[in-house]
């Protein structure tokens, strides 16, 4: 069955960096677009970024402002999110998600990894 | 950016009774390919989101048939025909018609 497992969340100081990873299994990873979606504590869902199946196209939410970079290594079935210049309002659970069939609609979600930005 | 507005914020429901959630979009969600990429997700306490419905009314794999989506253009509805205890959750609408993807603010379904 489809599994997505995120890792890399931690407590970091404002202005520092962190890299999240998401390993996919149970499906052909290089066939699907992948997302990162975040959820601040007690808040709703917020889309962060999307990468196409082959990594050639990337899209970001405006609030990213050039600070985050999505990438993937299809040989390792792994999705990444490099987060730089972190701010306190980036504190959230970060979920990776896979599209449904040929759609970009996020259909399969990981359990999430918590990033806490605090001094 | 497309803004999705959900109502109500909270819906207390008696077990076995129906529940209905509305999602209104700030612009039409009809894509240039003719499809409408409006979805509904369920998030139970302490769990990641789970896709229930995509393209307005298509039930995702394993979703019970008491969950039904409808609507068109800018107005959409999720209906639970008979609420069960396991349906206690926050429900979100989401659009994937235009980037950036966006979510509604969420509706909490709870038991009276």
Image: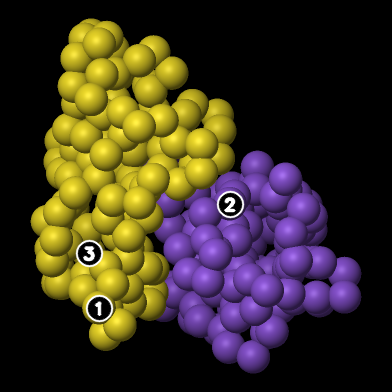
Q: Residue at x 45, y 63 (%)?
A: A105
Residue contact at pointers 1 and 3, CB within 8 angstroms: no
Q: Which chain is yellow?
A: B
Q: Secondary structure at mark 2?
A: strand
- Is A9 or B61 nearer to us in this picture? B61
In the displayed image of the protein, which residue is found farthest to the bottom? A56
Q: Which of the two discs, 1 and 2, sits closer to the camera?
A: 1
Q: Residue at x 39, y 13 (%)?
A: B85
Determine crowd level at label 2: few under 14, some 14-19, many 20+ residues with C-alpha closer than 10 A: some
- Is B48 or A1 nearer to us in this picture? A1
Chain of the residue that carries numbered disc 2 in the rendered image: A
Residues at marks 2 and 3, CA–CA distance in whole angstroms: 23 Å
According to the image, label 3 marks what residue?
Answer: B3
Q: Position of residue B101 (x, y in %)?
A: 38, 68
Q: Relative to A55, does residue B91 appear above or below in the rendering?
A: above
Q: Which chain is purple?
A: A
Q: Residue at x 30, y 42 (%)?
A: B106
Tell whether A73 sits left or right of A47.
right
Tell whether A80 sits left or right of A77.
left
Determine crowd level at label 3: few under 14, some 14-19, many 20+ residues with C-alpha closer than 10 A: some
Say if residue B48 shows up in the picture.
yes
Image quarter of the C terminus of chain B: top left
According to the image, label 2 marks what residue?
Answer: A108
Chain of the residue that carries numbered disc 3 in the rendered image: B
């Amino acid at each position: 069955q489809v599994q997505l497992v995120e890792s890399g969340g931690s407590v970091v100081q404002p202005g520092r960096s962190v890299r999240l990873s998401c390993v996919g299994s149970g499906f052909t990873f290089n066939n699907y677009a992948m997302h990162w979606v975040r959820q601040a504590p007690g808040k709703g869902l917020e889309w962060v970024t999307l990468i196409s199946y082959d990594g050639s196209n990337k899209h970001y939410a405006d609030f990213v402002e050039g600070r985050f970079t999505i990438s993937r290594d299809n040989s390792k079935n792994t999705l990444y999110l490099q987060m730089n210049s972190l701010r306190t309002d980036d504190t959230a659970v970060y979920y990776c998600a896979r599209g449904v069939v040929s759609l970009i609609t996020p259909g399969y979600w990981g359990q999430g990894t918590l990033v806490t930005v605090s001094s | 950016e497309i803004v999705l507005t959900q109502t109500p914020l909270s819906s207390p429901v008696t077990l076995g009774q129906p529940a209905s959630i509305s999602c209104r979009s700030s612009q039409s969600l009809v894509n240039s390919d003719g499809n409408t990429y409006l979805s509904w997700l369920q998030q139970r306490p302490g769990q990641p989101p789970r896709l229930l419905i995509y393209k307005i009314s298509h039930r995702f794999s394993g979703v019970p048939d008491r969950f039904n989506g409808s609507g068109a253009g800018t107005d959409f509805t999720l209906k639970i025909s008979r609420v069960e205890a396991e349906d206690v959750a926050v429900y979100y609408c989401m659009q994937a018609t235009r980037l950036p993807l966006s979510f509604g603010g969420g509706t909490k379904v709870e038991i009276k």
